[in-house]
Image (cartoon, rainbow, N blue to C red):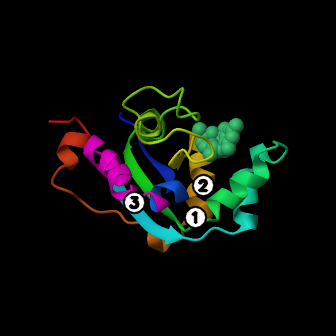
C-alpha cells in the first residue's frame, strides 16, 4: 500500500521579499502534491527557537531567527505518496550552492539562511511540525479530479 503522508513546508522570508512565492508553490503543485493547508504566519522568537531547537548552539542561530522574522512566512501542509521525502528532494540540500540543479534551492537561491524553503525531514518531525503551525480545523481533506494520477494506483 502506498504511504500517503503530510509534510510541513514554510516558504521563507527571502521568497516573499523576492516575490517568488508563486514559483515555489507552483513547483509543489506541478509535482502532484496536494495543498491541504496554507496561511501566512509571522513567527515569533519562541516558536522559532522550538522549531530550530537542533541548531540552538550554532553560531548562526541568532541570524537565522532574525531572518525568519523579517516578514511573515507562508506555512503549508502538502499531502502525497511519500510526501516527506519527495518534498525534501524537490527542495534540495541545505546549502543552495551544493544542491542539485533542478531543486528549488539550487535554482532560486545562493546562500544560507536565505534558501527559500523549510520542509520536514522525517515522519516524526512532520507530525510535530504540522501540529506546531496548524490547528486541526485549518487542515482540509478534499477530492481533486487529478487525485487518480497522484494517489492510489496512478491510472
Ligand atoms: N542554516 C544556516 N547556516 C548553516 C546551516 C543552516 O543559516 O550553516 C539555516 C538554513 O536556513 C537552513 C536552516 O538553518 O535551512 C535549518 O538548518 P537544517 O540543518 O535543519 O537544514 P534544512 O533541514 O533546512 O535543510
Ligand atoms: Mg532541518
Q: Earlier in the sequence, mark 2 or mark 3?
A: 3
Measured in 3D between alpha carbons, the distance from the residue under mark 2 to the one under mark 3, in whole angstroms, is: 25 Å
Quadrant of the frame with the N terminus: top left
| Vertical comparison of 55 with 9: above or below | above
Residue 120: percent from the left, percent from the top? Answer: 56, 45
Marks 3 and 1 close (CB-CB < 8 Å): no
Q: Magenta span covers which residues?
A: 17-33
The residue lying at 45 percent from left, 25 percent from top is: 100
According to the image, label 1 marks what residue? 133
Q: Earlier in the sequence, mark 3 or mark 1?
A: 3
**Element at badge 2?**
helix
- Dominant secondary structure of the residues highlighted in magenta in the image: helix
Q: Which numbered tag is attached to residue 19?
A: 3
Q: Nearer the viewer, residue 81 or 116?
A: 116
**Local secondary structure at mark 3:** loop
Q: Is residue 55 left or right of residue 29?
A: right
Quarter of the image that includes the C terminus: top left
Residue 111 position, x and y percent, is 58, 40
Residue drawn at 42 percent across, 65 percent down: 38
Which mark is nearer the camera, 2 or 3? 3
The one nearer the camera, 98 or 46, is 98
Residue 22 lies, in percent from the top left, at 33, 57
Horizontal arrangement in the rendering, residue 70 relative to residue 139 (left or right): right
Q: CA distance from mark 2 to mark 1?
A: 6 Å
Amino acid at each position: 500500500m502506498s504511504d500517503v503522508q503530510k509534510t510541513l513546508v514554510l516558504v521563507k522570508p527571502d521568497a516573499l521579499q523576492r516575490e517568488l512565492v508563486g514559483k515555489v508553490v507552483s513547483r509543489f503543485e506541478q509535482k502532484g502534491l496536494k495543498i491541504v493547508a496554507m496561511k501566512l504566519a509571522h513567527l515569533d522568537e519562541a516558536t522559532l527557537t522550538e522549531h530550530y531547537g537542533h541548531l540552538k548552539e550554532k553560531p548562526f542561530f541568532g541570524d537565522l531567527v532574525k531572518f525568519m522574522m523579517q516578514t511573515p512566512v507562508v506555512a503549508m501542509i502538502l499531502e502525497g505518496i511519500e510526501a516527506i521525502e519527495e518534498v525534501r528532494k524537490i527542495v534540495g540540500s541545505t546549502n543552495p550552492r551544493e544542491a542539485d540543479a533542478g531543486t528549488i534551492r539550487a535554482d532560486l537561491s545562493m546562500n544560507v539562511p536565505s534558501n527559500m524553503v523549510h520542509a520536514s525531514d522525517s515522519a516524526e518531525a512532520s507530525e510535530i511540525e504540522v501540529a506546531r503551525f496548524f490547528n486541526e480545523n485549518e487542515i482540509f481533506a478534499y477530492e481533486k479530479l487529478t487525485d487518480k494520477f497522484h494517489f492510489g494506483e496512478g491510472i
